Image (cartoon, helix red, strand yellow):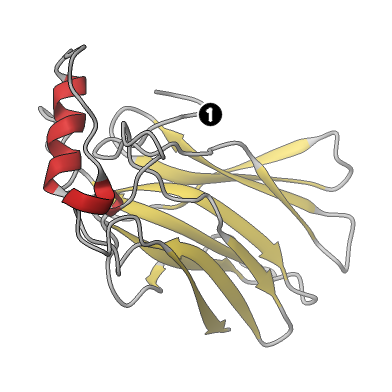
Amino acid sequence: MRGVVIHRVPGMSARVDCFPHPAADPASSKVYVVWCDFDGVQGVVKAAVSVDGFQWTQLGTVAQVSGRNAFFPQASVAPSGLVALIFLALTQPPANDPFQTGVQVYDAYYAQLAPGASAFTNPILVSTQSSNPDSSSYNNLMEQFIGDYIGIIAGSTGAVAVWTDVRNGVVCGEVDAYRNALYAGSRTAVAPNPDRECGIGFGNTDNFASRIDY
């Protein structure tokens, strides 16, 4: 699982977008891109910068959280040239059980690159409660689903970040049993009716927002 494109994070079956996402500096010709990268050990956020859109300078790993895999990074550049970064990070499952879904949770994190600084700051926790992606689902119930709705706007004195949050969702045991049967190779498993067999909070995902002052 190496490169800028990955469709799953260990411990979660929801799709993940790791394509490079751009952020233009409003005060110069600089353009930054950020993406998530998996080296087989941990998911991290990497970045690059260009002054003309043709020649790029790799910035390497700009953010990582111990014991977690980063995904869904987005960046924005403030009028001062400060680069603000938001991303999600899922707790890592055991190395011998990368498909341990239903147990792992994610949170939102923030880091920034100040004008003239040589590196991004260490990530800080932004979300106030963890989210379990197992509380959500595609319509066919075969896999988890969290909307890839994450973004950040960097202003002159602070940034506003938004992300998909599942803290109010409820895990459904019947759906888990169905998914596990499919993962085990069953061709006869029948999907449950979540309206009858799951709690009212199953599938409840929300958009949360936070302001981060510089």
Q: Quadrant of residue 108?
A: bottom left
Query: Which residue is more in the foreground, 212 or 173?
Result: 173
Q: Quadrant of residue 23?
A: bottom right
Q: What's the residue at 38%, 32% (across, down)?
A: 8
Q: Name the amino acid type tagged 1.
A: Val
Which quarter of the image is occupied by the N terminus?
Answer: top left
Question: Does 205 sit left or right of 195 as displayed?
Answer: right
Q: What's the residue at 14%, 24% (across, down)?
A: 181
Query: Which residue is more in the foreground, 48 or 132?
Result: 132
Residue 189 x %, y %: 18, 21
Q: Residues within 10 Å of mark 1 (few under 14, many from 20)?
A: some
Q: Is residue 104 at least partly visible in the picture?
A: no
Question: Does 78 sit left or right of 3 as displayed?
Answer: right
Badge 1 marks a residue whose secondary structure is: loop
Question: Does 71 sit left or right of 92 as displayed?
Answer: right
Residue 210 x %, y %: 50, 79
Q: Please name the residue that numbered disc 1 is placed on.
A: 5
Query: Which residue is more in the foreground, 196 or 135?
Result: 196
